[in-house]
Amino acid sequence: MAYSPSVQSLMEALRCLPGVGPKSAQRMTFALLQHDRDGARRLARALESAAETVGECRRCRNLTEEELCPLCASDRRDAAVLCVVENPSDVQALEDATDYSGQYFVLKGRLSPLDGVGPGELGLEVLQARFADGEVREIILAVSPTVEGEATAQYIAGMAADADIQVSRIAHGVPLGGDLDYVDAGTLSHAFAGRARYG
């Protein structure tokens, strides 16, 4: 079916969202235009505003409209402990699920030379400068246990070791309530290799 240029343009624009294919974009377009024009206008204004005003924190690279994000600006956070995560969404996940009170550094990806993602794309020169200022005493690596995540973790651990900073890594393994026969081999291997003393 041929759509008008504006409808086609909206569908194509919605496909930039992760996990949105042609059918999902079509459903979203029709829902916005048929049933919720006010919602469509709010969405357009919010997207425009965010695209114009949201940047990154100069210390941690998290998304913010200010020079420093609220977490870096807070005097209640322990600046000696730094948790390194891949994405801004990881910061919120840790804030919601843990009582972590240190600061963060957001990589916005993982090392992947084949995809053209090197240390510069991850802002590792900013992280190196934080290591050099002497305030950070421990880093917690909270990156995914993929091949790229492991390479990223090793690279950052090497940087931290050169700066005499203690390194730890969040545990990966069997989810709470999970049965071993339903856990994939990679996860089970990580869990077994990273086992801790019990009792």
Image (cartoon, helix red, strand yellow):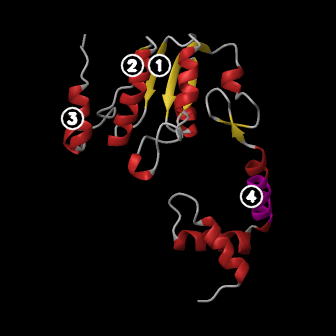
Which SS class for mark 4? helix
Front-most of 161 and 93? 161
Q: What residue is pinned by disc 4?
A: 43
At 45% from the left and 21% from the top, the residue drawn is: 140
Give the number of marks: 4
Q: Height in image: 111 above or below 193?
A: below
Residue designated by label 2: 168
Q: Tell me whether the residue at label 1 lies in contact with that at label 2, contact meaning CB atoms closer than 8 angstroms.
A: yes
Position of residue 60 in the picture relative to residue 147 (left or right)? right
Based on the picture, tell me whether residue 25 belongs to the magenta stretch: no
Q: Position of residue 110 (x, y in %)?
A: 44, 41
- Residue bounds of the magenta highlight: 38-48
Q: Is there CB contact under 8 Å for labels 2 and 4?
A: no
Query: In the image as oriented, which residue stretches furthest toward the bottom?
Result: 1
**Mark 3 vs 4, N-terminal side:** 4
Which of pointers 2 and 4 lies earlier in the amino acid sequence?
4
How packed mark 3 is, by other alpha carbons closer than 10 Å (few <14, some 14-19, many 20 or more), is some
Q: Determine the secondary structure under disc 2.
A: strand
Label 3 belongs to which residue? Answer: 189
Residue position marked by numbered label 1 in the rendering: 139
Q: In which quarter of the image is residue 175?
A: top left
